[in-house]
Image (tube, rainbow, N blue to C red):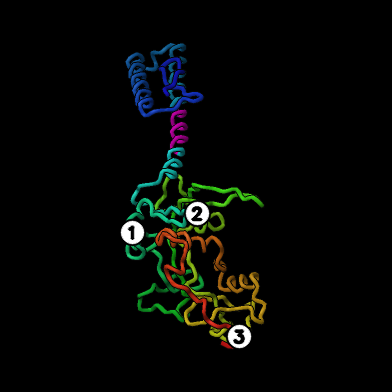
Amino acid sequence: MPSENKTPNLGLSQWQGNEYAKRQDFVEDNYKIDQGFENLKNKIGSLENLATEEKSDLVGAINEIENTVNSHLADYETHKADYEDLKGYIGYTENDIYGVEADFVNNKFTRLAGAVGKTPGADFDGINAFGGRKRCNLADNGTVNAYYGDAGYKEDGSNGQVMVEQPKFYYKVVPLQLEKIQDGKGYHMRKARYYISDTPKPGFKVHPAFVRNRKEVEKIYLSAYEGCIYDVSARTYLLNDKQVADFTSDKLSSIAYTKPASGLTQNLTRANARKLANNRGTRWQISDVLSAAVTQLLFIIEYASFNMQSNIGLGVVSKTDDGST
């Protein structure tokens, strides 16, 4: 509803309580401000000709305009945020936002916004968050030596670690249905919408995987393979999970055609795995929940599903590992 209270000189809106601004209110106030300046200009002619009282009135009018403009801006920003939240619940329609609605109760997944009508694979290649993922050879100092398809690209570790370059993106999660946990704290999320965008959008945030040490980065590198160990003293990769890791110097590695490192008889704790990763360089670390969540979020939007095995493949689930194979 329109503002009933007005400023004393120009009659500008002063919203209170349950009064809400409309676009027409801003249009009318802008016109009043413009007319106010025009009248002042015609009346003043020159500041040197003004009496002290007139100068005081002029300063008061200018302050009134400034305060009202600031109030308008603050009100606009408040309602802008409300509008974006409302859009999240109603559903975004922009073509450069991609999302999925997950109804966990009914096991139903619905594509949203720019993802509508798309199928997994080539349809998502033009979206940087998806198609910008590139396998590469990464040197210990963080330099990309080669990308997949380049002449020098290798998967055996001879040209750097085999990693996946992941561009930064923005995300938003909109809970639609929550169920209170009866025997604990918090809620189960029974229905939600998940969105991502290559570019900043009101209400969206940079995915936390791209914020390290309070610094935003443009890309991160994910392991292409499960970790094996490089034996520094022997100058060779332990291809068959030989239990001889030296946690003070050996390096965690990501290369093809190896058996992942285990703690069958060696003390491969999480802390020691971190040491192996750090031994490769100051910016290397083991995969954490943030980096894992990047791939998970992109997967559920591209495939409109939470079931990776049914959409991509079972993975390594049927091999025998009895210590002799």
Task: Specify the quadrant of the image occupied by residue 324.
Answer: bottom right
Residue 238 in percent (x, y) is at 56, 84
Which of pointers 3 and 2 indicates the residue nearer the eye? Answer: 2
Mark 3 → mark 2, Cα distance in angstroms: 42 Å
- What residue did someone put label 1 on? 118
Q: In terms of depth relative to the viewer, which is nearer, 300 or 298?
A: 300
- What residue did someone put label 2 on? 105
Is disc 2 placed on a helix, strand or loop? loop
Which image quadrant: the N terminus?
top left
- Name which residue lies at 35% across and 75% down: 149
Q: In the rendered structure, does residue 74 fall within the stretch colored magenta?
A: yes
Magenta stretch secondary structure, dominant: helix
Q: In terms of depth relative to the viewer, which is nearer, 301 or 66?
A: 301
Verify CB contact (< 8 Å) between mark 3 and mark 1: no
Please give the range of residues in magenta.
Answer: 70-80
Amino acid type of the residue tagged 3 in the rendering: Gly
Residue 263 in percent (x, y) is at 64, 78
Give me the disc on residue 131.
none
Q: Earlier in the sequence, mark 3 or mark 1?
A: 1
- Name which residue lies at 38% across and 74% down: 148
Is disc 3 placed on a helix, strand or loop? loop
Amino acid type of the residue tagged 1 in the rendering: Lys
Amino acid type of the residue tagged 2 in the rendering: Val
Judged left or right of residue 31, residue 272 is right
Q: In terms of depth relative to the viewer, which is nearer, 182 or 308?
A: 182
- What residue did someone put label 3 on? 323
